[in-house]
Structure formats: C-alpha cells, structure tokens
Amino acid sequence: MRFRGRGLQRRHQGRLGALLQVVALLFFLPILGGGTPALRATLALGLADCARQAMPGPGAASGSGRRVDPLSIWSLSLAMELLWRPASITSISLQLSYAATLGLILFWAPCHAYVMAVWHRYTPTPHWGSDSLGKPRHAAWPWVIRVSSSYLVGGLLASVVATLSTLPFIWIHFGEWSPVGVIGTLILLPFVAAGLFLGWCYAALPWLVPTAWAAWPFEQIPIWLERFDAWAWTPHLLPERPPFLIAALFSMATLALLMGKVGKGSHRMGIDRIVQRLALGLGCALLLPSVSPPSNMTVHVCDVGHGTAILVRMPCGRNWLFDAGSRDRKGVANRAILPLIRKYSIDALHVVISHGDRDHQAALARVASRVKVLSYTGPALSFGFEKSTSITQVGLDWDMGRGTLQSSSCRLKRCRSKILRGLDQHGNEGSRNLWVECDGRAVLLCGDAEDDGLMNILPHLDSKQPLAALLIPHHGSKQKNLRCLISHTRPEQVWFSASKRSPLAQSWPYMKTTTRWTARDGGWSEEFKPIKQWAGNLNTAPP
C-alpha cells in the first residue's frame, strides 16, 4: 500500500505506510517478550519512521518530510515512557539506557572526528590498495582493513563514551565499576551480531540451520564474562561520595564538552577553560582517597543477624576482617561490609575466618573479589570460590593448627595482633580467634569454640591485662566455661553478634559489665582511646 498506492493520493501513501509499520512493530513487541530494551527500541524505530512522513518544516520542499533528529527522538521516547509509568524515573534500567544513548548522541561524533584528526595528523596516509613493497593487494583487502579499523576505533570510542555517560548512575547506585567493560563490549558485540543473524536464519529456515549453531554465540557470552571477571579491577570499588557532588562533577564535565562543541569565540573559550578546570579539580577531589587511618584502634561490628562480620582498623594502616557471613540474611557483603570499606577507602585486608560455617564465611567471596587480601587465616573456603584460586594467589596463607600465630608490631610501635586456636580440628571447637591490641587496649574476637577449643587459648592471654572488649563465643549460647573466661579476661565490654535467639545476651549474669548486642543495638563502631604509658611503647616486637 505504501509503494503501489492502491488508489491513495501520494501524500497519504507514506503516512499510511508509517502507521502500518508502527502497528507491525507493536504486534512484534510481545513476540520479543515485551521487555524494556525492546520497548525502547520499538519507540525509537516508530518515531524515526513517523518523522520522515511528518509535515515538512517552513521553507522545506513539499513531501520532503522531517529530518530524523536523534536528540528529539530520545527526548520524545523518554517523555512517553515517563508518562506511561512515572515511577520508572527511579529505575536504574531507565537511567542507564537513556544516559548511555544520550552520551552517544551528543559526544560520539565530535570525539570520533577529533580522534581521527589526531590520527591523520601524526600517522602517514595509509595506502590500503598496495602492500609495503608497492604491490597491489587483492580487491577485498582494502575493504576488510577499513571496516576492521573503523570497528575497532569507532566501537572502542563508543564503548568509552557510553561507559563514562553511565558512570555517575553506577557510582551512586552500586559504588563500583568495571573498566574492563570498555573492552568487553567490543569483544562481545560480534557474538551478539552472530547470534542475531543465526537466530533469524533458524527462525526462517529451521530445517537448514541446526539449533546448536544458533545457540553457540550466546553460549560464548557467559564464558567470556567469566574471563573478564578474573581481570584486575573487575569490579573496582569507587569511594563513597555524596550523590550531589557526583552529579555536579558530571554536569560540569558535560557542560565543558558542550561548550567546546558549540563555539570557538574567545569569551566562550575562556569560560570553557574555567569549567574544565573546575571539573578536573572536583574529579580529583572525589576520586582520590580522602580518608586516612584512624588515630586510634577502631572496631566496626556489623549487624548481620545470626552470624559475624567485624572490621578492625589500626592507626598504622593495617585492616583486619574477622569473619564475614550470616545464616539468615542475604547481601551481607553489599549491605554491611563493602559500604564500610568504601567509606574508609580501604584497599587491602588481613582476613581471619574462625571456621567453615556459612554464618562466618559466606560473604567473603564477594569481598575478596573487590579488595586485595594481604593474608588469609582460616579453613578451606567453600562458599562462592575455591581457596586455591582466589585467596592464596593474591595474599599469604597463614593458616595454622593449634597454638598462636603472632604478627609483628607495627611501624608506629603501637599495634600488634595474634591469632589463637585451641584445637586443630574441623567444626566449632577448631575455631580461630583474633586478638588485637593498640596502645595497651586489647580486644578479643572469639569464634564458636566454647569447650576445650576455648579453654586452650586462655594460657596465651595475659591475665594481668584486662580486655577493653570481648566478643562472646558462639553468638552468646549458654556456655559452661563462661565464668572462667570472664575471670581470666575481665572485659570492660561484652559484645554479642547474634540474632534475637541469644540466651546469654537475653540474660547476662554479670550486671557490672557493659553489654552490646547487634539484635538489640544494631551495628556499631567503637574507638579505643590509648593508655598513655603504653602509647608507642610495645614491650615486645616478635618476628
């Protein structure tokens, strides 16, 4: 009907054809599954075809239609989606999709022109038709070389532009990014293209195209994603910053690029330089670490329900993570541990896992994939990764049998620590315990040992030095050796990392001792002030 007319006037043929094409796209949308990416592609295609058949602008030739303006289609698509579902404005899917598309519309062409201009300025003019000896190449080679170079340069530049355009939303929502995604997109696109082509061939001629052929490209994508995940800085934690400062940084960077793109006048160039310098200064301030080690030992106890996750920060820069798991809560790494690591700009950890239960190590795989593990002491890890491939390749394996493993004193002569284990066996009684001290204030973090595994570590503790804080073993279960533990350590504070089912936390018999309980008080941070005569004066400095 569009091309033959069927009796319609010429000026109505294109409009009717565009209407039928939009209807066909709407019918095709449910076949694609009706997902938001398919919906946005349908909106863009439908609006682009309608634009060609719209009334021409003032002074344009009759029947010429409207120019397809990508920015107008982007704006109209976004407006239609928000009118249909206003609540979707907070959707990360919508924000990432439209941010990436807007960045490509505004900046890909000028960036590509700039890169090509620099390339041609500093490289000789290529002669695709002949080789280095001047002999003519095969007719297909110049075309292959031009297409390959265009794909590599243009695709890589498009991936960089899209990644930087979505970075503010990724920073605010996730707090981490993967620089390898810039190259990963370029590598995965051929698999997507091959999958789409073979998929259409299979849909049209299923008796000629085997199913395995059509599925092969999509089977390769997760394999390559797993390879990318093993690269360094994948993913990489971004420092925690206020969202309004992140938005201000990228707004100023966008404004500087737009001003450089629009005009070259002297006045505009001066403002352009000012905005660029402001964006550069703010970017350095936001990206560079701004948190120094604490002045005193600080312990952060996370509320993880039935489980344990405790971060210890020392003045010398050492950071200890004792246990990382929960039995009744999900997302311990993302919701409890990693926010602390981002907040204090921690890039390396010494990890101690008391024993192999889920409520003590389940979240470590995700933490270890984002922060360097300098040393690991604990059982063979079984939740999320293998110990041999994820821990010992990046740090020292300090695991131990029965006894004490003591670290050297710090460079400031203020801090020291040791790991204690009462029994060399699996299970609760084989739990490892972490003792940390700074300026005469000591904290003992216990695992789940409460019988011989607990009693065997007491001789390794100085009974003359009271503890500043004690984490009660086994989440506050009833223990027959409790009186001996309290009399030997004489803690100022007693902590319970436990859910609401904790017998000792519910009925603590020693009323003079301060108690803190994660189920009752939530998570907390405790800074331990130094004892003056001990500050910077450790008696021993073991190897």
Image: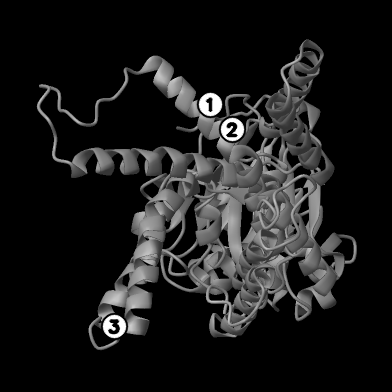
Label 3: element kind = helix
Quarter occupied by residue 506: bottom right
Q: Callout 1, which amino acid?
A: Tyr
Label 2: element kind = helix
Q: Which residue is mark 2?
A: 110
Percent coordinates x, y for residue 314 in the rendering: 66, 37
Q: Quadrant of the C terminus?
A: top left
On screen, residue 29 versus residue 391, left or right, reads: right
Q: Which mark is residue 161?
A: none
Whichever of callouts 1 and 3 sits on the residue coming sooner in the sequence is: 1
What is the distance, in whole Å, between disc 1 and disc 3 at their CAs? 44 Å
Percent coordinates x, y for residue 367 in the rendering: 56, 55
Which residue ends up furthest to the top in the rendered image? 266
Using the rendered image of the protein, determine whether residue 400 is visible from the camera's viewpoint: no
Q: Which residue is mark 1?
A: 114
Q: Which residue is mark 3?
A: 211
Residue 257 higher or lower than 50, as above or below: above
What is the distance, in whole Å, between disc 3 and disc 2 at their CAs? 42 Å
- Viewer-proximal residue, 436 or 17? 17
- Viewer-proximal residue, 454 or 438? 438
Q: Callout 3, which amino acid?
A: Thr
What is the distance, in whole Å, between disc 2 and disc 1 at their CAs? 6 Å
